[in-house]
Image (cartoon, helix red, strand yellow):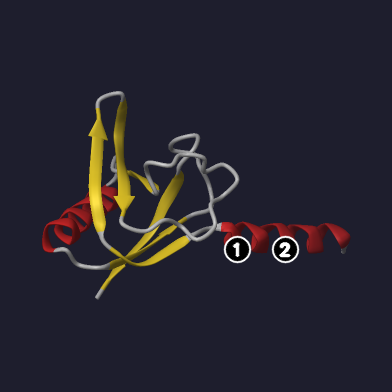
Amino acid sequence: MKNILALVFGVLSISVSATTVSDAKVVRLMLDLNYPNKVYIDLDKRQPDLLQCHQNITWEYVLDISTNHGSHVYSALLAAKVSGTKIQISGNGYCNLHHDIEDFRRLESW
């Protein structure tokens, strides 16, 4: 029973630690040959509480564009930047794609 509670608590704490930025505009996007298949995202707002692993002060999120889904999200980010549309963007609570930037998880626009 203790193992099950520890597992449930661990899963809940992971989902709680992911960040979200609302009503933000995309300031810039970066592609770099030194970091293939990644897009770095800079917003006009910062995450309210950074993850412990997120120590980078330049970029809010990093997106994996090696998949079709990632490519579609990148297109949506470009459209939001060009149009000045406000978005809501969330991370996944991890810094796996780049050691000090939270990984992208979700994009919403309205």
The residue under the point 54% across, 57% down is 49
- Amino acid type at mark 1: Val
Residue holding disc 1: 16
The residue under the point 24% across, 35% down is 31
Residue 39: image location, x then y, percent? 29, 41
Work out whether 57 lies above or below 93.
above
- Amino acid type at mark 2: Val
Q: Judging from the image, what secondary structure is the residue with disc 2 in?
A: helix
Work out whether 67 lies above or below 4.
above
Res. 90 image quadrant: bottom left
**Badge 1 local density, few (<14 within 10 Å), some, or many (20+)?**
few
Q: CA distance from mark 1 to mark 2?
A: 12 Å
Which is nearer the eye, 52 or 67? Answer: 52
Which is nearer the eye, 54 or 96? Answer: 54
The residue under the point 29% across, 49% down is 70
Residue holding disc 2: 8
Horizontal side of 50 relative to 42 (left or right) equals right
**Badge 2 local density, few (<14 within 10 Å), some, or many (20+)?**
few
Horizontal side of 10 relative to 56 (left or right) equals right
Of tags 1 and 2, the one toward the viewer is: 1
Q: Earlier in the sequence, mark 1 or mark 2?
A: 2
Residue 54: image location, x then y, percent? 52, 43
The residue under the point 80% across, 64% down is 5
